[in-house]
Structures are given as C-alpha cells and as structure tokens.
Amino acid sequence: PGEVLGNVFRHYFIKTGEWLLGRQKRKLEHLKLALELSDGVYPSGFSDIFPVHMSAPELNYSDVDTSCLYMGKRLAAPLMINAITGGHPETAWINRELAAAAGQAGIAMAVGSQKAALNDYSVRETFSVAREVNSDGLLLANLGACCTPGEALSAVEMIAADGLQLHLNVPQEIIMPEGDRNFKGVLANISTIINTVSVPVIVKEVGFGMSRETVLALHAAGVRNIDVGGRGGTDFVAIELSRTNKKCFDMEGWGIPTAVSLLEGLSLGLEIDFVASGGLRSSLDMARALAAGAAMTAMAGPFLKSLVEGGAGELEKSIRYLIQGLRKIMLLTGSANIRELSRKPIVITGPTAEWLERRGVS
Ligand code: FNR
C-alpha cells in the first residue's frame, strides 16, 4: 500500500507548491487527507433504521434480484461509486480503475469535479479515461452548481455522461481560504442547466446533508434527482481544517446526518429520486436506505480506500461483497426485488426518530 500511495503522491511529496496550480494541488491534498483521516465522529444515523426481520420469507435466495433501472440503464444493484477525483495527472489511474470496476460489476460511477479540465485540456484525459474503460456503463459528470450552462455541456460531453451531478458544498467553500463566497442565483442557475443539458441532473451535497427546505427549493427549481450527501462519512470540515492547518473548529459537526436528510426529503412525497450517500458503509446501510425509499445508494471514501490501499482486486471484492450482502438482507426481509424492499416496513429509533419528531416529520 505504501508503494501505491507513494506513487499517487509522488509529485505531491516531491514538488509541493513548486509547480502545481492551486486547484490541482488541492485535488491531491483532498485525496491524501481522505485516505489518512477516518470518518467523522458524527454518525450517519443509519443505525437508527431497522428493516424488519422476516423468519419465513418464502423465497429462494437464487431468485432474489438486486438489479435496478437507473437513468435508463440496468444496473446489477442500486449502488454508485460517488464523485471523487480527476483533474491532476496523478489521478487518472484512480478514475480508470474505479470506472473499470464499476463497469465490470454493473454499478454506476461519478467522476470528481471536472472544473480543472474546462480550461486545461491537458487534464481532460484524467476524466475521459473513465469512459474509455467503461464504454456502456452508467457514468456521471460532476461540476459545482454555480458552473455555467456551457461548462455543464462540456463536462457531460467530456465523458459522454449519462447524467450530470451538480454539487453544493457551501460549508467546504467557506472554510477554504480560496473558496467561493457568493452563492446568489444558484437555484436559477440549476434550473437553466437542467433546461440546457440533455441528460438527467442530480444535485448533490458532499457530506453536509440537505434539509427538507432545501429539497423543496430544489424541487421548485425543477430538480428531480437529489443526492442528500449527508453527514456521517467523509468529513470535509476535518479535511479542510487539516489541509489549511487551522485549529479553528467552529464548524465541527456541522450538517445533517444522512438518515435524517433522506427521511426528511422522502417525507415530502415529491417526485424526486433520492440517492442516499454520506457515511453508508455496509450492505445493511444500503438496505436501510433502500427500504426507507432511496432509489440509489452511493459511497466515495470506502471505494477510494479499497483501491488505493488494496488495489483493483480489493475494490472489485468490496463491490461484490456489498451486492451479495444486500441480496442476503433482501432475503431476510422477504424482498424478491428492490421495489419490494422499498415497500417493507422499517422502524426508526434513537436520535434520528427524535430529530424527525422535533422537525414535525411523520
Ligand atoms: C469527494 N466528494 C466530491 N463530491 C463532488 O461532488 N465533487 C468532487 O469533486 C468530490 N471530491 C471528493 C474527493 C474525495 C477525496 C472524496 C473522499 C470525496 C464527495 C463525495 O462524492 C461524497 O459526497 C462524500 O465523500 C460523502 O460520501 P462518503 O465518502 O461518506 O461515502
């Protein structure tokens, strides 16, 4: 693992700051710190959600079908490798391996923010490599929600994407000394982009979650796909504080746990497909989210760690185990397919139940 890491961050260690552009340097620092730091101490809330055990499921395990249709493509399971990287030459191999593994396993994948490649043609290949090794799979492009419609079009075109993720990451921006400060007009911008690109648009958070007020505002702006990207997993407050060597912890713990965010959003009963992400770490977490009503589940940090620390074989194994585990839990809940799982009873307890109650969510 040390060797692989050494390889990834060769330039980082040797030439820190000497020639790397700010954004490129940041890409490597995010990767390095996401690998070094463990998940935040704040729980995702999924351990408060209990799908109900069915002792006599009347199903044959071999008939349990984990597949789903998502954005027009058939997937082996509702699972996505969420946006991680690209934009620096040393990141191309990561997108290549993630995309190849996603293609082989039949799951979806998003590349990291393509901002760096919009003006610098030399790093386009760090994203397009994903499509080269995964010609038929479901691939999502990624940009910040403040990008221009033209930039959105070019990000989609760069990887022949099946969909576009637009990320909202205000807490991260305001911690970063070089981050954005003006978020005015973002909802109107999202509307314009939805009307400009020909593929579905997912608006996503990056680990701070979405309130139902945000979900309502996004729905009014025309958004029909939301990744709640809640608190409980990769912690960008910790990453940014560590990156900038700041001791100021005034934002520690900020955000909405993923389970709360998902349940708040679903409670609105709107025509929105939700992606559950942020701190999902097991097949059981996937099953909890799907039973609650999520259309898709996604993980970023765990897949990055599997790949960098264990290599492509380990990544392939972790995806396979997640899908196998989901299938077992589907059997245990008496669900022959994902649609049936989404209709099974769940019990919500603990701080998640308390949060929802205090917010008047039923
Ligand atoms: C991310 N994430 C992210 N999201 C995004 O929309 N654009 C991006 O460029 C990135 N970059 C990025 C880099 C690294 C190193 C990590 C680990 C993550 C956020 C990611 O997609 C996801 O929303 C969060 O990581 C929460 O999920 P996990 O990691 O808890 O499963």
Image (tube, rainbow, N blue to C red):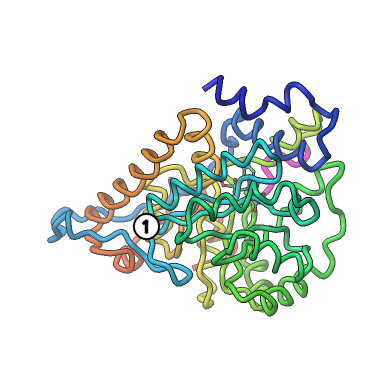
| Image location (x, y in percent) of residue 340 | 29, 67
Residue 354 shows in the view: no
* Tag count: 1
Whether residue 251 is in magenta: the answer is yes
Does residue 259 appear to the left or right of 33 in the view shown? left
Determine which residue is flagged by label 1: 77
- In the rendered image of this protein, does residue 185 appear above or below residue 107? below
Percent of width and height locating residue 119: 80, 54
Name the kind of residue labelled 1 in the image.
Answer: Ala
Q: Residue at x 34, y 49 (%)?
A: 323
Question: Residue at 36% across / 52% down in the picture?
Answer: 50
Residues 112 and 212: in front is 112
Q: In the picture, residue 176 is in which quadrant?
A: top right
Image coordinates for residue 191, horizontal then vertical, percent? 71, 76
**Secondary element type, mark 1:** loop
Q: Residue at x 66, y 31 (%)?
A: 33
Q: Please, is residue 161 above or below residue 103 in the view?
A: below
Neighbour class for label 1 at 10 Å: few (<14), some, many (≥20)? Answer: many
Residue 8 is inside the magenta segment: no
Q: Nearer the viewer, residue 149 or 288?
A: 149
Which span is picked out in magenta? 250-255
Q: Looking at the magenta stretch, what is its main secondary structure?
A: loop
Q: Who's the residue at 57% across and 45% down the image?
A: 95
